[in-house]
């Protein structure tokens, strides 16, 4: 029986049984609504491998974690470069080798999205941040892991780009789009950076 | 001077966003419910940040915020109570 059916009955009959049925229907509806409420979660897609954009992602992630939110970061495409600790050419095919040689070998080599000037811009930004006592990207990554931020690495783009597990930092979970959606659909905040 | 009583203190001088929050969160986690943490920050953004934290998190309460002057710069004081 739907709420409006019950509603109709209550109005027309005015008997206690109909009222009880109405209560039950409303409770069921409330249960359904509560079950579809988002949790205290934040989901972030890190698509970019630009230092400035990645920094923004990690400031939000660590900030949200500090506020008691459960945070998931999903790294895909250029975002995978953030998670690299080294670059290894062994076992890669020609295109994968070219890709690896043209990509940053670790988070320390990420370029900035504007005014990079062959890496000078990125070095300058890092120096300016250190002078102002802002945590470095590497410190923020470590901090995020300490605070329990979930880091998911897109398995498909990792495979396409030929990035092996041993090139990546530890503590990552391989994941696909459904794993991300599983988190994002239950999150109050979703960002694509 | 402040009238607010506190049990523990965090010196976040010189730290920038999001570090005062991150450190405060860590330190208050080590306190028992009912205890108060005083945070000393030089980051003026921390005023709104700590208000935001209190608004979102159910387990803390922002008791007071004050501004003091030390030498030639401002200090921002936050008193955060762990509720549960």
Image: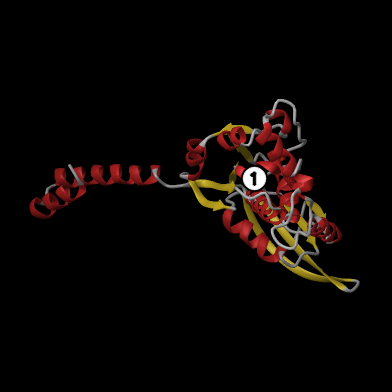
Kindly give the residue lying farthest to the front in the view shown.
Answer: A94
Label 1 sits on residue: A79
Q: In screen coordinates, is A37 left or right of A165?
A: left
Residue at x 27%, y 47% (from the top left corner) = A26
Q: In screen coordinates, is A154 left or right of B8?
A: left
Determine whether A20 is above or below A89 in the image. below
Q: Position of residue A94 (x, y in %)?
A: 68, 33
Q: Position of residue A84 (x, y in %)?
A: 73, 38
Residue at x 50%, y 45% (from the top left corner) = A184
Kindly give the residue lying farthest to the top in the view shown.
Answer: A91
> Quarter of the image containing the N terminus of chain A?
top left
Q: Nearer the viewer, residue A67 or A95?
A: A95
Q: Nearer the viewer, residue B1 or B16?
A: B16
Number of numbered labels in the structure image: 1
Q: Chain of mark 1?
A: A
Q: Position of residue A2 (x, y in %)?
A: 19, 45
Q: Position of residue A86 (x, y in %)?
A: 77, 35
Q: Nearer the viewer, residue A180 or B43?
A: A180
């Amino acid at each position: 029986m739907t709420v409006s059916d019950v509603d109709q009955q209550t109005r027309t009959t005015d008997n206690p049984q109909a009222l009880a049925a109405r209560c039950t229907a409303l409770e069921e509806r409330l249960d359904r609504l509560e079950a579809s409420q988002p949790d205290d979660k934040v989901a972030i897609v890190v698509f970019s491998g630009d230092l400035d954009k990645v920094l923004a992602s990690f400031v939000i992630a660590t900030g949200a974690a500090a506020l008691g939110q459960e945070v998931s970061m999903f790294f895909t495409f250029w975002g995978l470069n953030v998670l690299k600790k080294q670059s290894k050419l062994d076992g890669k095919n020609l295109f994968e080798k070219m890709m690896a040689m043209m990509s940053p070998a670790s988070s320390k080599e990420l370029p900035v999205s504007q005014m990079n000037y062959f890496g000078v811009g990125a070095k300058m930004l890092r120096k300016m941040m250190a002078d102002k006592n802002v945590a470095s990207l590497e410190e923020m990554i470590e901090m995020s892991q300490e605070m329990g931020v979930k880091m998911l690495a897109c398995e498909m783009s990792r495979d396409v780009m030929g990035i092996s597990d041993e090139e990546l930092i530890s503590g990552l979970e391989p994941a696909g789009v459904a794993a991300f959606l599983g988190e994002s659909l239950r999150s109050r905040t979703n960002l694509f950076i | 001077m402040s009238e607010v009583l506190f049990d523990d203190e965090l010196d976040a001088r010189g730290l920038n966003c999001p570090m005062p929050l991150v450190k405060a969160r860590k330190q208050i986690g080590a306190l028992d419910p009912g205890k108060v943490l005083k945070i000393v920050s030089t980051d003026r953004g921390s005023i709104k940040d700590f208000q935001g934290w209190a608004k979102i998190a159910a387990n803390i309460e922002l008791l007071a915020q004050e501004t003091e002057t030390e030498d030639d710069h401002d200090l921002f004081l936050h008193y955060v109570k762990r509720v549960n």
